[in-house]
Amino acid sequence: MSELIEALAAKVDAQLHGQVRRVAALASELSYETDAPALLSVCRTLRDAAELRFEMLMDLSGLDYLHYGRDEWQTDSATRSGFSRGRVARTDVPDPDEAGRFAVVYNLLSITHNQRLRLKVKCPDTAEPVVDSVVDVWAGANWFEREAFDLYGILFRGHPDLRRLLTDYGFIGHPFRKDFPLIGNVEVRYDPDKKRVVYQPVTIVPRVLVPKVIRHDHRYDPALKDTQVPR
């Protein structure tokens, strides 16, 4: 499998030398990153080059790197007190406006050559994350880009109808962003007096969730497996 991946990588490098950068991936996968200004040119080459022919966009998703590489849970081992609690006081809180926070990932399929490739582009501006729409390259990107806009707030320049897709019309914020509150911002209820649905500030009380305590149990000790218990 790796030989096939390397052969495909050589074709991609020959067609897009200097426009894409190979990034780490599993041995059975091929992944590249490009800059926002070159996105449309790269996508058209991936689709049209005879040796590549990535005719189909299988999926498009947004990414939020706000807490990337940070872990609040110590889950390698457990004591009698169980795992560590969430929401540990931290001193390395990431800057939500840090450059490169948002990115878009494109998963491509070549039906002609039966090959797959992943392409990633970072949004240059975190305050207003914008990249070019690829609807003119792959028509199937229409709803995928609307989904990424709805859930991450990523804007797609040139999209023919960029509006929310999954959340309600009056929804506030973008729920897949790492700094979006788990309890949300508003809630919906039916008001019997007004005889209609109304929006109001959320009334859920925030709380810390503690995972189940895991302790060593002698019943699962390999040395005692299939042993007869004396009567």
Image (spheres, rainbow, N blue to C red):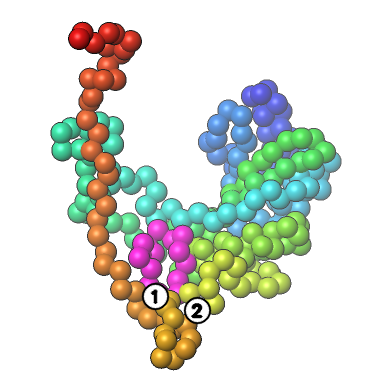
Q: Position of residue 196 (x, y in %)?
A: 48, 86
Q: State the extent of the magenta-drawn residues as a range.
A: 172-187
Q: Earlier in the sequence, mark 2 or mark 1?
A: 2
Q: Position of residue 165 (x, y in %)?
A: 60, 68
Q: Position of residue 57 (x, y in %)?
A: 71, 50
Report, in whole angstroms, how far the alpha carbon at label 2 lies from the one at label 1.
9 Å
- Name the quadrant of the C terminus: top left
Q: Which residue is mark 2?
A: 170
Q: Residues within 10 Å of mark 2 (few under 14, many from 20)?
A: few
**The residue under label 1 is which amino acid type?**
Val
Q: Which residue is mark 1?
A: 186
Does residue 69 show up magenta in the picture? no
Q: Residue at x 39, y 75 (%)?
A: 186
Q: In which image quadrant can residue 96 be found?
A: bottom left
> Quick check: 65 left or right of 218?
right
> Quick check: 105 left or right of 215?
right
